[in-house]
Amino acid sequence: MSEVNGSPGMADVGSTSGGGQADPSQHVIWWRDRIATSIARSRKIRGANFVQIASCDPSTGEPRCRTVVFRGFLPIDPASEGNCAPCVMKMITDSRSNKVTEVGLSGEVSLKKNNLELVYWFGKSSEQYRIRGHAQFVGDTFTTDPRLSSQRVQQWGNLSDSAREQFFWPDPGVIYPGTPPVVPEGGRDLEGKVIQPPPKSFLLMLLHPTRVDYLRLTDNYKQVDELVVNEGGDADTQLDINVETSWRFSRLNP
């Protein structure tokens, strides 16, 4: 099972269900609980779910960064109880985009194979989360776990019409021919229903966090949370229900 471990003497700190007698802003709180509060405070701000993800071009070693939409955390599945599912972050991408090749095509999710970093900035509260981990793609030619595939289908249905249309365009990054391509309006069929199954170009992109650097500029509070394999585990194995992991966190100088 996944556990949350803090520094000695901090076992009672970090619960979101406590009585709230102390000021939680000054204590070490698990990042997943903390970011839930940050998101709630910024929910009404336009663009508050825009995040930046950085990868590396494998052919040149050059960094690449872009803005994507954070679409929530992977729901907790009873069949996955005890793993890292409550922390897995959802985004979408096009299978033909550069980011897919930049982060690699491996389906393995390992503590020692981070290939992506996400930055989530909350302007209202002056908080920054730098979230490092391993990206996983869910689609026809990628990960096809039924539970994750159902999340992909659901996310496809939740997109706006204009967002769905993008996945029916020709290959991204090529010269624009001057006239828009003929695509299904709104990604819908002649009866107005969302086209199913999603096109092969549509991927659900998951980030499995392994390290979170948190910084709050209002009082220069800095914290680092790291996911570790418990004793007897193997950091090279896939992070699933069979791997014992825990989150350990520390407060650091900013």
Image (cartoon, rainbow, N blue to C red):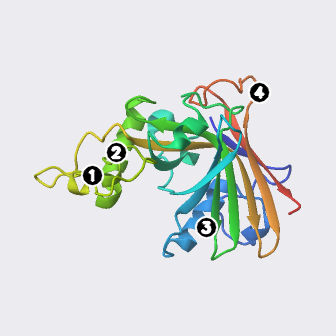
- Discs 4/2, front: 2
**Front-most of 116 and 14?**
116
Distance from disc 3 to disc 1, alpha carbons, whole Å, reads: 40 Å
Q: Which residue is mark 1?
A: 181
What kind of residue is marked 2?
Answer: Pro
Q: Determine whether label 4 and label 3 are within 8 Å by CB.
A: no
Residue 5, image quadrant: top right
Q: Determine whether label 4 and label 2 are within 8 Å by CB.
A: no
What kind of residue is marked 1?
Answer: Pro
Which label's residue is closer to the chain start, 2 or 3?
Answer: 3
Image disc number at residue 38: 3
Distance from disc 4 to disc 1, alpha carbons, whole Å, reads: 55 Å
On the rendered image, what quadrant is the N terminus found in?
Answer: top right
Image disc number at residue 190: none
- Discs 4/1, front: 1
Which label's residue is closer to the chain start, 4 or 1?
Answer: 1
Q: Which residue is mark 4?
A: 231
Q: Which residue is mark 2?
A: 170
Mark 4 closeness class: few <14, some 14–19, many ≥20 residues within 10 Å: few
Q: Residue at x 44, y 43 (%)?
A: 204
Residue most extreme to the right: 253
Q: Is residue 184 left or right of residue 64?
A: left
The kind of secondary structure element at disc 3 is: helix
Q: Determine whether label 2 and label 1 are within 8 Å by CB.
A: yes
Which label's residue is closer to the chain start, 3 or 1?
Answer: 3
What kind of residue is marked 3?
Answer: Ser
Q: Determine whether label 3 and label 1 are within 8 Å by CB.
A: no
What kind of residue is marked 4?
Answer: Glu
Q: x and y percent of residue 86 in the render?
A: 55, 46
Distance from disc 4 to disc 3, alpha carbons, whole Å, reads: 33 Å
